[in-house]
Amino acid sequence: MGRWASPRRQGTQLPIRPRIDYAALFAATPSPCLVLDPDLVIVDVNRAYLRATGRTADDLIGRHIFAAFPDNPDDPHADGVRNLRASLQRVLAYREPDTMVLQKYDIPLADHPGAFEERWWSPINTPVLAPDGAVLWIIHRVEDVTEFVRSGGPGRLAARRPKVREEAMEAELYGRAQELHRLNEELRQAHSRERHVALALQEAMLRCPSLDFHPGIAVRYLPAVGTLNVCGDWYDIVDLPDDCFAVAVGDVVGHGLEAAAVMGMLRSALSAAIRAVKKPAPALDVLDLYACSLDEALNTTAIQAVIDTRRRHVSYSNAGHPPPVLLHPDGSCTLLDQATDPPLGARPEHVTRPQVQLPYTHGGTLVLYTDGLIERPGEDIDLGLARLTDALTRFARLGPEHLADALLAGLDVSSGARDDIALLIVRL
C-alpha cells in the first residue's frame, strides 16, 4: 500500500492513519483502569487493574463495583464506598471528570474470604459521553500509592525509621487527606446547591407562553458544563398586533445566581418594552436606559427582531450581539449585521440605536443564538460564523426542531458547552 490515501478533493493528499486496536490499547495501559456503565456495573478492566487488585476479569466483569469492592467491615472509619459513590454520582450529574483526594480503601483478599488488605489509592473518574451528552461509560482510573503511604512519603529513612514514627506520619497524612476531602465535599455541595437553584430560576424565567402558539419556532437552552457556569443567556417570544411577533436573545456577562437574576430583570424589561413600542430599536433604547441603572447589566448583549408575517419582512436592532442568520429556502445565508451597536450601557451618553428592515421569502428560517454556539477559545469569530452558516446550508431542509438538534450536534456543543447557549429558530 502506498503512503498516501486517495484524495477526497482534487489536488489534496491525505495521509493514511493506521487503524488502532483500542481494546488492545486499553488492556496494555499501565495505569489500573476499569470501565463502569451508568448503573456502576463493571463492563471492562485492564491488566494493570487486575494486577493491582489480585483479581481476574471473571471476578469483576458484570458485578456492581461496590459488590466487588465493599467497605472493610472491621474498620469503623471505612468510608471508601461513600466517597467513591459520591464521586461517581458527580460524574453522572455533571458529565465531567472528578479527581478524588487520597483514599484509604481496603480491598478483600481474593484467597482469604472475609479478610481485607489495607490499600491507599489516588483515583480519578472520567465520563465517556454519547453525542447527545449522556454518560455512556465511566473510566475509573486509580494509582496504587499504598507503599508510598506506608513509607511516609518522600524523604523517608528507609528501614531505619522507627515504626512508631511511620505510623504517626501515616495517621497524619490520612487525617490531612480526610480533612481536605471534607472541605472539598462542602465546597462541591455549596456549588451544587447554587447550580440547582440557578437552573431552576433559569427554567422558570425562560417560560414563553406565546411559544405554544408558534409551532414553527424551536428553542433550546444548553447550560455550560461546570458547577457555576450557568444562567447568563435568555430567549423570548412576544405576540404583537397586526400579524407581527417579536423574538429576542440576550447574554448577561457573568454566571451563577447573580447573572440569572439580572437576566430575569432584563428579559422582563425588554418583553414589556417591545409590547409598548412594537419596534426593535426603541425597545432596545428602553432596555439600554434600564441597564444603566444596574451595574451587573452593563455590557450585556441582546438582539431584538420583529417579524411581520403579513408584509413578510423582518426588522431588527442589535446591541453588541452575534448577528442572526437568515437562511433562505435555497440554502444560502444572510447575516443580519447591518444594525449593530455597542452592548447595553457601553456608551457614557444615550444614543438612539439603529434599526434595519429586510424582506424574507416564505419557507425561510431565522436563527438567533448566543455566542456559546459559535465561539471557541483562541479562534476568530468569523470562523465560528462560517461554521454556523455551513451547517445551516447542510441542514436547510430540516424543520425547526430537528434543525436545532442538528446544529447543536453538528457544531460539537451538545456534549458539553464551555459557555451557556440559547438558540431560537423561526420558520418564516
Image: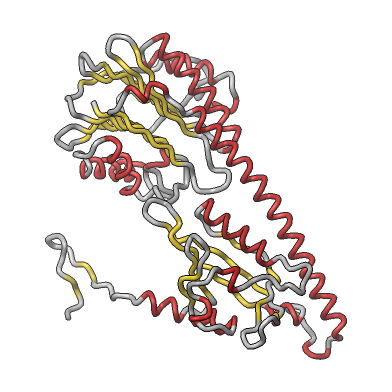
Rendering quarter of residue 285? top left
Rendering coords of residue 424 (x, y %) = 35, 32
Q: Name the image colouring.
A: secondary structure
Above or below 206: residue 229: below
Q: Quadrant of the rendered structure where residue 50 is? A: bottom right
Q: In which quadrant of the rendered image does the N terminus lie?
A: bottom left
Residue drawn at x 61%, y 61% as measured from the top left: 85
- Furthest toward the front, the residue is 113
Q: Who's the residue at 41% across and 28% down the image?
A: 249
Q: Residue furthest bottom?
A: 159
Q: Would you say 210 lies left or right of 348 here?
A: left
Give the percent coordinates (x, y) of residue 135: 45, 57
Q: Is residue 147 left or right of residue 357?
A: right
Whether residue 385 is situated above or below residue 303 in the rendered picture: below
Along the line of sight, the residue nearer the viewer: 190 or 299? 190
* Foreground of the two, 109 or 248: 109
Residue found at x 40% / y 44%: 375
